[in-house]
Image (cartoon, rainbow, N blue to C red):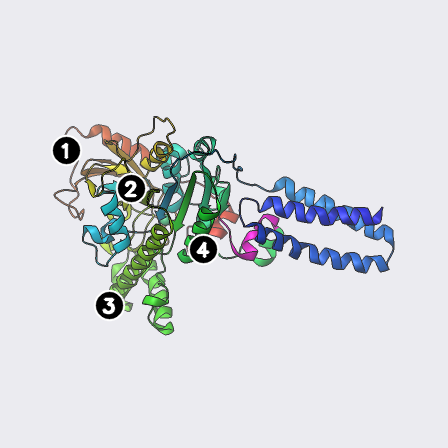
């Protein structure tokens, strides 16, 4: 009886671990984690045999009930629905975090990006692509729902998407789905893992055990980000081992600050420490240019820009590894989630708080053999929202969502102003229409930009006649109240370098 209760507890340990990590890790890793969790129980059991058997049975039953409790409160993303055979294309979506559109070599960027340029040559380059929000989670939610951040409800990092994503539709159509992420800001709590049968949103031993809850309290949440080479290697491994049509989402966070490029381009250790210190010091002084100019030389700004460029080169190398590792008939979408301010308008090395073009323009590329002629270049306005329709179109799923090849008249943009690394300003809203932009701040003050004549947004103009409709829309966006976050989510964001109050 006592032994039975004990064996049941051990079985539960393996069973719950296997189940809780089913969408997260490889079978080998799941087995290893089960063994690690079972080891202390085995030890305790051996010790208790020396005591009274009834104590052994009681503890065994207690452990079993504990596992039932853990199992009941754990949130797992929806599982896959299995494969459907057939010659349908694999789809790879690579999202480039914090990658400025003007840093692509093919548009004259400051560093070489041969892999991305090659991808542009084999498909389409969208030169007028923008995001809906200059923050990671809201922008990615737009990619997977086809909606703006106001519509899908995930308006600030740390929130959950309130609209359905398109991934379950691809699953239902027979696609195997895997998400390979590199920042906890896209953790399953955002709701973006739904429909991915493998969603690597937590990693390393501690990260994998975060489903236990206890592990997070005792050991912290593990690594909050991981390097792109590991992400790419795991994604390629999954792609090569999975049969049937597949969708892989590969998220590369490397260009996000602080800019610490890998050894190939890295200066010595002391220089990197100094670069990291400067990054935060410069960011914190935003809005008070006189202050930072006093204690930090402008050369530091130049060095940060060089380090950012090195990160861009590294991300390009990672994209190259993906392209070399997949068959040429694979449909490839590359989309940025937002850009980065490198000093324009006195915003230093961040994003999230303003709707200026350095943060809002994104790289967007599509290789679709047979559907998109190689070397296509489009200047039509496209949005990160159009990724959702493109994924469905690539899988042959009927949809009313526009894709990247459809013309788009406007894009609504929103900045919560709450969680830039340094910015804590009020919300703002904008409407992009062709090459113009109407921006409203939280006080309802409206400015108008002609981006063709004034690409640097140096001359905000009063609203010309005929633009009242866009002004009303921009104002409505800006007036939405800033979202509230609970303390646990704030802690996670702080660990990622966000200092939102
Ligand atoms: Zn991002």
Q: Secondary structure at mark 3?
A: helix
Please state which of the two labelled residues, at mark 1 or mark 4, is closer to the viewer: 4
| Label 4 – label 2 distance at C-alpha | 27 Å
The answer to whether mark 1 and mark 3 are in CB contact below 8 A is no
Q: Is residue 89 left or right of residue 206?
A: left
Q: Main secondary structure of the magenta part?
A: helix
**Residue density around tag 2, few if under 14, some if 14–19, many if 20 or more, within 10 Å:** many
Magenta segment includes 269 = no
- Mark 1 neighbour density, 10 Å: few (under 14) some (14–19) many (20 or more): few
User: Where does label 4 land, which residue?
Assistant: 225
**Mark number, residue 464:** 1
Ligand 1 within 8 Å of the CB at mark 3? no
Q: Where residue 244 sits: x, y (%)?
A: 46, 38
CA gap, disc 4 to disc 3? 29 Å
Q: Position of residue 213 (x, y in %)?
A: 60, 49
Q: Are marks 4 and 2 in contact (CB under 8 Å)?
A: no
Q: Looking at this rendering, what residue extends furthest in the left direction?
A: 453
**SS category of the residue bearing label 1:** loop
* Mark 2 lies on residue: 366
CB at disc 2 and ligand 1 closer than 8 Å: no
Q: Is residue 209 visible?
A: no
Where residue 158 sits: x, y (%)? 45, 45
Given contact means CB atoms under 8 Å apart, are the residues at marks 3 and 2 in contact?
no
Instruction: Give the mark, 3 or 2, whose residue is nearer the N terminus.
Output: 3
Over which residues does the magenta segment extend? Answer: 201-213
Say the numbered circle drawn on residue 113. none
Q: Is residue 477 above or below residue 33?
A: above
Number of residue marks? 4
- Which of 85 and 433 lies nearest the eye of the viewer? 85
- According to the picture, the residue beneath numbered tag 3 turns out to be 299
């Amino acid at each position: 009886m006592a032994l039975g209760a004990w064996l049941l507890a051990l079985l539960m340990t393996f069973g719950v671990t296997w189940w809780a990590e089913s969408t997260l890790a490889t079978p080998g890793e799941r087995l290893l984690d089960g063994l690690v969790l079972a080891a202390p129980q085995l030890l305790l059991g051996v010790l208790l045999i020396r005591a009274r058997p009834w104590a052994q049975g009681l503890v065994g039953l207690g452990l079993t009930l504990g596992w039932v409790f853990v199992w009941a409160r754990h949130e797992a993303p929806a599982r896959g629905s299995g494969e459907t055979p057939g010659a349908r294309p694999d789809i790879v979506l690579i999202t480039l975090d914090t990658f400025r559109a003007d840093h692509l070599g093919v548009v004259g960027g400051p560093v070489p990006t041969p892999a991305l340029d090659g991808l542009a040559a084999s498909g389409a380059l969208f030169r007028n692509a923008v995001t809906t929000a200059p923050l990671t989670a809201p922008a990615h939610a737009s990619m997977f729902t086809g909606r703006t951040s106001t519509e899908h409800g995930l308006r600030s990092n740390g929130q959950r998407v309130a609209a359905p994503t398109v991934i379950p539709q691809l699953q239902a159509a027979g696609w195997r789905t895997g998400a390979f992420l590199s920042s906890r800001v896209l953790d399953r709590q955002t709701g973006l893992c739904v429909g991915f049968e493998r969603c690597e949103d937590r990693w390393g031993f501690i990260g994998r055990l975060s489903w236990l809850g206890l592990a997070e309290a005792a050991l912290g949440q593990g690594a909050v980000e991981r390097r792109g080479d590991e992400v790419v290697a795991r994604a390629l491994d999954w792609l090569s081992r999975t049969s049937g049509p597949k969708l892989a989402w590969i998220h590369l966070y490397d260009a996000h600050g602080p800019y610490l490029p890998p050894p190939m381009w890295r200066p010595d250790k002391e220089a990197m420490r100094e670069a990291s210190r400067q990054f935060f010091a410069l960011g914190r002084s935003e809005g008070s240019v006189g202050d930072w100019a006093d204690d930090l030389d402008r050369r530091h700004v130049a060095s940060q820009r060089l380090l950012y460029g090195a990160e861009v080169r590294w991300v390009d190398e990672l994209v190259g590894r993906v392209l070399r590792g997949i068959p040429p008939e694979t449909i490839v979408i590359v989309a940025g989630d937002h850009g980065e301010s490198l000093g324009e308008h006195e915003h230093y090395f961040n994003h999230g708080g303003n709707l200026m073009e350095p943060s809002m323009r994104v790289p967007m590329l599509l290789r679709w053999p047979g559907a998109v002629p190689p070397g296509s270049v489009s200047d039509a306005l496209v949005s990160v929202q159009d990724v959702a329709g493109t994924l469905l179109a690539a899988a042959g799923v009927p949809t009313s969502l526009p894709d990247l090849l459809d013309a788009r008249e406007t894009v609504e943009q929103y900045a919560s102003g709450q969680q830039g690394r340094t910015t804590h300003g009020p919300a703002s809203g904008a409407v992009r229409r062709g090459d113009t932009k109407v921006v409203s701040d939280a006080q309802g003050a409206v400015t108008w930009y002609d981006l063709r004549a004034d690409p640097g947004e140096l001359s905000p103009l009063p609203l010309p006649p005929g633009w009242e409709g866009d002004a009303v829309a921009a104002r409505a966006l800006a007036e939405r109240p800033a979202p509230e976050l609970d303390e646990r989510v704030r802690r996670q964001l702080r660990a990622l370098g966000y200092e939102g109050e």
